[in-house]
Amino acid sequence: EVQLVESGGGLVQAGGSLRLSCAASGFTPDDYAIGWIRQAPGKEREGVLCVDNNDGTTWYADSVKGRFTISSDNAKNTVYLQMNNLRPEDTGIYYCAADFLPGTCLKMVFGSWGQGTQVTVSS
């Protein structure tokens, strides 16, 4: 069974940094596409970043380019979202998600989701 557990959210001032973790079990992230999706209060979910380890595709939302990066620790089966220079508009619940189907990062459609972690950026 594929499971994803996010952690690392919290309250940070604008300009600060956070690193979110997504611990994966039941699969190897190297074989999947991993995405980070966020949902701000009162808004729909939006894709933030996606990396497809099957074909090397990486996609970033324009709003986070140059500020957010994704990395992984294969020994820990964990994927990280490093968020720098945070802005109040980055506030929301951040979810990590995974899927093994080709083209996942193009469609941003995932079959497995974590429970989310709250990120709040104060101005």
Image (cartoon, helix red, strand yellow):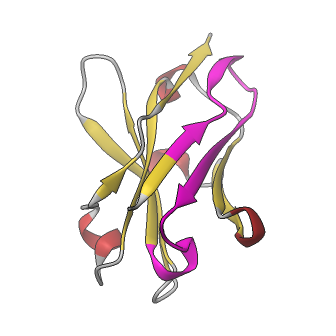
Q: Which residue is pictured at 71% across the width and 71% down the height?
A: 74
Kindly give the residue lying farthest to the top in the view shown: 123
Residue 68 rendering spot, x and y as whole percentages:
63, 50
Taking depth in this image into account, of 70 and 23 the one nearest to the observer is: 23
Residue 60 visible within the image = no
Q: Quadrant of the N terminus?
A: bottom left
Question: Relative to residue 17, is residue 81 depicted above or below?
Answer: below
Taking depth in this image into account, of 84 and 75 the one nearest to the observer is: 75
Left or right of 16: which side holds 46? left
Residue 104 rendering spot, x and y as whole percentages:
31, 72
Residue bounds of the magenta highlight: 5-32
Q: Which residue is pictured at 68% across the width and 20% down the height?
A: 14
Residue 98 rendering spot, x and y as whole percentages:
40, 62
Question: Relative to residue 114, is residue 70 depicted above or below?
Answer: below
Q: Is residue 103 magenta?
A: no
Q: Which residue is pictured at 73% across the width and 62% down the height?
A: 76
Q: Which residue is pictured at 60% across the width and 18% down the height?
A: 121
